[in-house]
Image (cartoon, rainbow, N blue to C red):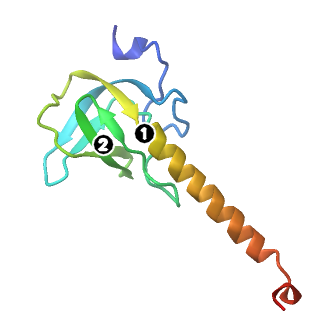
Amino acid sequence: MSDEDDAFNTITRGEDLPDPRLQSFAVVTAIVPGERPVVRLSRTIFLPEEEGQTADRGWIGPARVLHVVRHEGEINHHVEMAESLVVGERYPIAVDAEFRYVEAAGRYLAAKIFMEILQRKPEDYQ
């Protein structure tokens, strides 16, 4: 099955909504070596860090994704180690659903508390 025929119907780079199933397949299009190697994919389900949004974590095949950022129109997946990945190969990709849920719940609770504080009147503090 080609990347274009992906039965999971995942998003391509640049689209904003992730696949709600939090797992799919993608082809590694580039690997940038370094202390924290960067992997670029043909498509992604990982949410990058943006405007208060915590970056997703998860896996690209056997490689653990530690951080995701958008840089110059590309989505960079920072991984622990990229030695096991090969450019042009197709790998399963999966978002750490528990991490995403905990982060979302934390943001929701913080926003709710903040809104409650803003809606109080000065006499509420006496």
Q: Is residue 125 above or below residue 11?
A: below
Left or right of 95, for residue 116: right
Label 1 amino acid?
A: Phe
Query: Looking at the image, which residue is at 77% across and 70% down?
Result: 116
Label 2 CA crowd tier, 10 Å (few <14, some 14–19, many 20+) = many
Q: Amino acid at mark 2?
A: Val
In the displayed structure image, the side of residue 68 where residue 50 appears, left or right: right
Quadrant in the rendering for residue 126? bottom right
Which mark identifies residue 65?
Answer: 2
Residue at the far top in the pictured view: 1
Of the residues tagged 2 and 1, which is closer to the observer? 2
Q: Which residue is mark 1?
A: 46
Q: In the image shown, does 30 or 119 lie closer to the viewer?
A: 119
| Whole-percent x, y for residue 30 in the image | 21, 36
Spot the residue most to the right: 123
Residue 46, position as x, y percentages in the image: 42, 39
